[in-house]
Image: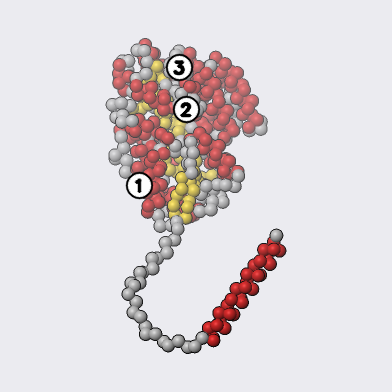
């Protein structure tokens, strides 16, 4: 077959050669033609359009889906593409929960995006330790990001002595509540201590309202109860040890924390069937007056604002109540960041996009739309609603900022804690067994 094709090509070339020779011979035999007078051209010569170089398509994957900021991230990408001369960001993202697996598969399969969002803390550390991320110190210094990113979250950029993630925003978690529901139940001052909190829950229940809504269908919303109850009874240092496998799930300290959680459930303080609905459902239950409050991050304000609710009038926030006065207040939430894979094909465009997201205009757009606290200290927060300003004041007033449970331990160990939360909300009576099983699994993770 191949030989046949070669013969055919040789034959065509031979025929073409003969035709050219004959053409030349025939031309030579023709008498010379009388030169014709030149003809003036009446056709206007159109200018040649300059060649426009195609923009470099830059693939992005992020977890800002649905109510978690998809609309505003699309706007940021569109504005970037409109002003960038060389780069075009192409959004290939997926759902929030699917992302957690998808990004690891992409990195392991040598099919990474050019830039992706990730949660600062143990999750970034996990990928850094796999040599899958690009070190960004040169970019950090060139853009003078040390003068841009808020001092309080700059530590979230450092891993193994280098810069591997660039913050986009951070959050605060606390009890977001319906002021009208609270007032109807006779609660005019928000609780500051655990005893006051239990009293408020009892008043709400007596008024026919579920005190707490918790949509734990996807497990992660329940982790805040683990964070606060363990840390506010055993201390922040103990919680850090638990996250590293240096303390055990079946320690007396964790037992005590789970007993407090069990008491809340046994008293009927949670809206029924928490594992059957998601965090937005819990937010709806609070907004409608079916529940009094929900323990959630500041992204809930973006959700409520999108539904037309008014800060302070329709929703407000108070910190998790103090259990042990000797333990200073803290908040457990997330720092969303950007990372670039080590073998990204278009790293320069990825860096240009990250720098764009940190401009004051984009930071303000994102913070107000998503319900986040801006990573850039240069953002004008004067237009923030009073509830978001209050969250900022809590942190600037001395409240420690710590990454939430699943962001402060390895992904395998995070799964253990997330499962524990779902089990507790399903049947708290078996909490001791849950903790024993969790410790067996955790010991395997940390090989102890």
Q: Which residue is mark 3?
A: 272
Chosen colour scheme:
secondary structure
Q: Which residue is mark 2?
A: 221
At which x and y percent is residue 67?
Answer: 41, 34
Task: Point out the frontmost of discs 3 and 2.
Answer: 3
At which x and y percent is residue 401?
Answer: 44, 35
Residue at point 39%, 47% (across, down): 78
Residue 378 visible in the displayed image: no
| Badge 1 or badge 2: first in the primary sequence | 2
Q: Secondary structure at mark 2?
A: helix
Q: Secondary structure at mark 1?
A: helix
Quarter of the C terminus within the rendering: top right
Residue at point 52%, 24% (across, down): 421
Alpha carbons under labels 3 and 1: distance apart: 43 Å
Residue 274 visible in the displayed image: yes
Q: CB atoms at circles 1 and 2 under 8 Å apart? A: no
Task: Point out the frontmost of discs 3 and 1.
Answer: 3
Task: Examine the rendered structure and indicate whether residue 161 appears above or below residue 389.
Answer: below
Q: Which residue is mark 1?
A: 360
């Amino acid at each position: 077959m191949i030989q046949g094709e070669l013969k055919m090509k040789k034959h065509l070339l031979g025929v073409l050669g003969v035709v050219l020779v004959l053409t030349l011979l025939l031309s030579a035999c023709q008498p010379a033609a009388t030169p014709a007078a030149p003809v003036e051209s009446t056709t206007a010569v159109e200018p040649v359009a300059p060649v426009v170089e195609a923009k470099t398509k830059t693939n992005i994957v992020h977890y800002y889906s649905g109510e978690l900021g998809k609309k505003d991230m699309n706007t940021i990408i569109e504005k970037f593409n409109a002003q960038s001369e060389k780069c075009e960001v192409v959004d290939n993202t997926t759902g929030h929960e699917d992302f957690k697996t998808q990004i690891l598969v992409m990195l392991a399969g040598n099919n990474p995006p050019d830039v992706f969002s990730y949660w600062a803390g143990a999750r970034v550390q996990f990928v850094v330790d796999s040599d899958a991320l690009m070190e960004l110190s040169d970019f950090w210094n060139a853009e003078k990001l040390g003068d841009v990113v808020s001092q309080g979250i700059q530590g979230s950029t450092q891993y193994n002595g280098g810069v591997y993630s660039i913050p986009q925003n951070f959050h605060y978690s606390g009890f977001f509540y319906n002021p009208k529901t609270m007032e109807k139940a006779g609660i005019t001052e928000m609780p500051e201590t655990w005893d006051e909190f239990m009293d408020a829950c009892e008043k709400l229940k007596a008024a026919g309202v579920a005190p707490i809504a918790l949509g734990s269908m996807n497990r992660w919303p329940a982790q805040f109860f683990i964070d606060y109850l363990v840390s506010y009874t055993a201390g922040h240092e103990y919680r850090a040890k638990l996250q590293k496998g240096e303390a055990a799930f079946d320690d007396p300290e964790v037992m005590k924390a789970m007993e407090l959680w069990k008491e809340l459930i046994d008293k009927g303080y949670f809206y029924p069937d928490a594992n059957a609905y998601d965090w937005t459902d819990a937010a709806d239950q609070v907004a409608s007056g079916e529940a009094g409050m929900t323990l959630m991050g500041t992204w809930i304000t973006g959700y409520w604002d999108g539904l037309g609710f008014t800060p302070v009038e329709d929703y407000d926030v108070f910190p998790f109540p103090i259990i042990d006065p000797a333990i200073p207040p803290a908040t457990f939430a997330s720092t969303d960041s950007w990372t670039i894979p080590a073998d990204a094909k278009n790293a320069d465009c990825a860096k240009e996009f990250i720098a764009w997201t940190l401009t004051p205009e984009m930071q303000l757009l994102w913070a107000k739309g998503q319900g986040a606290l801006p990573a850039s200290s240069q953002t004008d927060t004067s237009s923030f609603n009073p509830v978001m300003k209050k969250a900022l004041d809590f942190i600037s007033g001395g409240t420690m900022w710590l990454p939430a449970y699943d962001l402060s331990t390895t992904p395998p160990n995070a799964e253990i804690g997330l499962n524990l939360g779902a089990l507790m909300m399903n049947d708290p009576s078996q909490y001791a067994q849950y903790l024993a099983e969790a410790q067996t699994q955790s010991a395997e993770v940390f090989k102890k």
